[in-house]
């Protein structure tokens, strides 16, 4: 079994290639997948499994410890194993953090490619953690030169993130989230918030709202008005609607209906995953299912093997 580490492999990866690979993966037979979530106090253990015809299988386990941030440890850690299509033999152990970074950000980057209004260039990033950093990289790669604004509860963490990127991109730290959200062409939320941070009344026509952080049934980053005003898209209906509070709660409270989710990535071949007008508010829920981990792991393994001539 190959061990694919971040330090050696990441230099060979490309955001546009990966978004193309994820789009192509949704032309394959629908994934067989399942999740198992265990919770203890404010901690979570999430195991995700997927099989896709032609790509093999993957099992990924994430341990989410929010309090790790205060000790300067990653809040999410875990393992990921890629299994062979023909024999089920473990082929590769892929660095968990690298896989999660590229899967999560490419998921939302693909949606932004398809849903953000042409010419969108003002981006508000809500949150200043690992995912926020990845989204700055991914958006810049797939959408071109952008102007970023960054809002975070801790200004110190926002400053750290801004210093990390230096002059590589235009970035401003903002204090008024309402004003910034109302001015943005893209609003991206990447937080551990359990209650809404973004209010629908703030959003201007044509904005693209990218919701990444919520992953449990009680977590939300946008309020009822936002999901009512937005045309709703998800990466996968099966891993979001009944599993994540962002949609599960407003559906249960009859704020919206299940049928209000217009499309997921499996609707890409039919052309349904797209905005219909410049004024349409598009809302994308990034659920990050195991099938996306598998598509990303398959891409990473192929790049690794080509780089080191170890077969394909």
Image (spheres, rainbow, N blue to C red):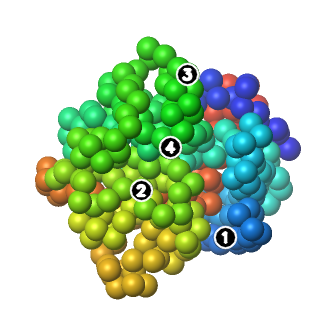
Q: What residue sits 16% from the left and 53% below the top?
A: 205
User: Residue 33 occupies which quadrant of the picture?
Assistant: bottom right
Q: CA distance from mark 4 to mark 2?
A: 11 Å
Q: Quadrant of the N terminus?
A: top right
- Name the spot of residue 294 as percent of width and height, x first: 63, 54
Circle 3 is placed at which residue position? 164
Q: What residue sits 42% from the left and 35% below the top?
A: 150
Q: Which mark is residue 197?
A: 2
The residue carrying pointer 3 sits among few (fewer than 14), some (14 to 19) or many (20 or more) residues within 10 Å by Cα, namely few
Q: What residue sits 82% from the left and 38% below the top?
A: 3
Looking at the image, residue 207 sits to the left or right of residue 85; the answer is left
Q: In the displayed image of the protein, which residue is found farthest to the right? A: 1
The kind of secondary structure element at disc 2 is loop
* Labels 4 and 1 touching (C-beta < 8 A): no
Q: Is residue 217 above or below residue 82?
A: below
User: Residue 39 occupies which quadrant of the picture?
Assistant: bottom right
**Labels 4, 2: front one:** 4
The residue carrying pointer 2 sits among few (fewer than 14), some (14 to 19) or many (20 or more) residues within 10 Å by Cα, namely some
Circle 1 is placed at which residue position? 35
Residue 284 visible within the image: no
Q: CA distance from mark 4 to mark 3?
A: 18 Å
Q: Which mark is residue 153?
A: 4
Q: CA distance from mark 3 to mark 1?
A: 34 Å
**Labels 3, 2: front one:** 2
């Amino acid at each position: 079994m190959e061990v694919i580490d971040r330090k050696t492999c990441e230099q060979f990866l490309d955001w546009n290639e990966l978004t193309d690979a994820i789009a192509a993966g949704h032309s394959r037979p629908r994934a067989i997948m399942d999740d198992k979530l265990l919770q203890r106090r404010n901690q979570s253990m999430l195991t995700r499994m997927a099989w896709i015809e032609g790509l093999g299988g993957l099992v990924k386990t994430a341990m989410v410890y929010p309090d790790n941030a205060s000790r300067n440890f990653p809040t999410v850690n875990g393992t990921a194993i890629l299994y062979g299509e023909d024999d089920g033999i473990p082929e590769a152990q892929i660095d968990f953090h690298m896989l999660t970074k590229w899967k999560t950000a490419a998921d939302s980057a693909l949606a932004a490619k398809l849903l953000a209004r042409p010419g969108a260039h003002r981006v508000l990033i809500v949150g200043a953690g690992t995912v926020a950093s990845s989204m700055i990289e991914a958006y810049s790669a797939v959408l071109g030169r952008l102007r970023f604004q960054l809002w975070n509860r801790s200004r110190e963490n926002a400053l750290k993130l801004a210093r990390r990127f230096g002059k590589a991109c235009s970035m401003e730290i903002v204090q008024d989230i309402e004003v910034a959200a109302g001015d943005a062409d893209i609003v991206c939320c990447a937080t551990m918030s359990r209650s809404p941070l973004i209010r629908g009344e703030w959003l201007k026509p044509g904005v693209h709202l990218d919701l990444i952080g919520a992953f449990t049934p009680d977590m939300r980053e946008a309020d009822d008005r936002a999901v009512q005003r937005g045309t709703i898209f998800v990466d996968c209906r099966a891993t979001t609607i009944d599993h994540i509070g962002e949609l599960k709660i407003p559906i249960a409270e009859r704020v919206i209906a299940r049928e209000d989710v217009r499309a997921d990535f499996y609707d890409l071949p039919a052309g349904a995953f797209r905005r219909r007008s410049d004024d349409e508010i598009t809302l994308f829920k990034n659920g990050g299912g195991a099938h996306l981990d598998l598509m990303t792991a398959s891409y990473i393994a192929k790049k690794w093997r080509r780089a080191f001539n170890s077969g394909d």
